[in-house]
Amino acid sequence: MSGLSSLRLALLQINPVLGDLSGNRRRIAQAARRVYALGARVAVAPELALCGYPPEDLLLRPAFLAACDEALAACAADLADLVDFQLVVGHPKALDAVAVPAGDARPRSGSMQRCLNAASVLGAGRVQATYAKRELPNYQVFDEKRYFVSGREAGLEPVVIEAGGRRLGLLICEDAWFDEPARAARDRGAEALLVLNASPFHLNKQTEREARMTERTRDVGLPLFYAHLTGGQDEVVFDGASFAVDAQGHVAVRAPMFAETELLIDWALDGRLAGAVADVPTLEAQAWGALVCGVRDYIGKNGFPGAL
């Protein structure tokens, strides 16, 4: 790794509005420009950040998936002037729009539209690579097997990108809770894991997440960068608190909960991670933050003038 310098990454902790593709695109692009100006050369937006989470039956509409493709291309064009910069952003992708190995059967469920829960790498004004989520949760509030085909089921390979001379493997949320996706990225040469997330809040969820991600880093021996949504959507609240874990399993950087922010992380040649470390609030403060966030966004995102 001689001749390399430290790499600055940014986790874009945003609060998207479900279905507002143009608004979400602007929000992501503006955040990307801010972190680029501060020296970041890789930025990671959360799972399905382009369309909002969870999009549910919107995913059954071909016109919605086509509009997501247009918004993704437009976002890439918005950032075309940023030299040596890559943005990783979550979005849905129609399965038929992705090349699969010859002879692989494409899964179907009756006449239902099937698609991928995807993460694309944008740079130089175009989509450079696309990864598909491999582990699909189907419990509690999750119903992903209704809508998505696993990247593994579709015969798609893991994705590892290069930035600043480093090789970064992509994972999406549930992927990082299982052994195989991270090991597959490592085996393809990844030196770190970028994880896009939309993980619903419950009390003390952040402590659980960090514990599981430290297990993952220790298993594969790689640092992990966890970009998480914030905000409320109907009955689901996302608490933010994006973070990074070094290869030894220590949480080195953390964003605040229930707030839009950009978390900057410096990854040094010796493996050290440096950046701000927000405190994890008390359980009472977490409950209050979730209630305020959920009510505020339910009223605001639905355009209600107020409530009694």
Image (tube, rainbow, N blue to C red):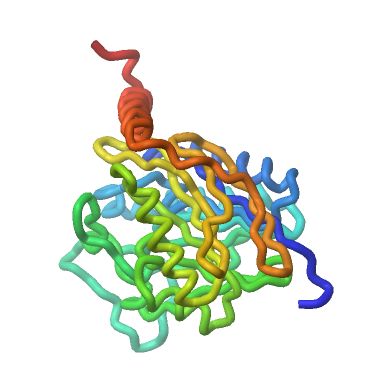
Residue 202 visible to an observer of this rendering: yes
Front residue (pair 286, 70): 286
Q: Where residue 182 appears, x then y in whole percent?
A: 45, 74
Quadrant position of residue 96 = bottom left
Can you say whether 115 is above or below 290 in the image?
below
Residue at left offset 64%, top offset 49%: 275
Name of the residue lying farthest toward the bottom:
103
The image shows residue 177, relative to residue 79, as above or below, that is below
Going 41% across and 75% down the picture, which residue do you hit? Answer: 181
Of residue 7 and residue 134, the one placed in the foreground of this image is 7
At x 55%, y 58%, the residue is: 88
Number of callouts in the render? 0
Which residue is located at x 55 percent, y 69 percent? 248
Where, by quadrant of the figure, is residue 83 drawn?
A: bottom right
Q: In which quarter of the image is the N terminus?
A: bottom right
Q: Tell me residue 144's x, y (percent).
A: 26, 59
Please name whichever residue, 122 or 1, is drawn nearer the observer in this view of the structure. Answer: 1
The quadrant where residue 112 appears: bottom left
Name the outermost residue toward the left: 110
- Using the image, determine if residue 146 lies above or below residue 192: above
Residue 6 % position (x, y): 75, 62
- Residue 24 in sight: no
Q: In this view, does 295 lie above or below 45?
A: above
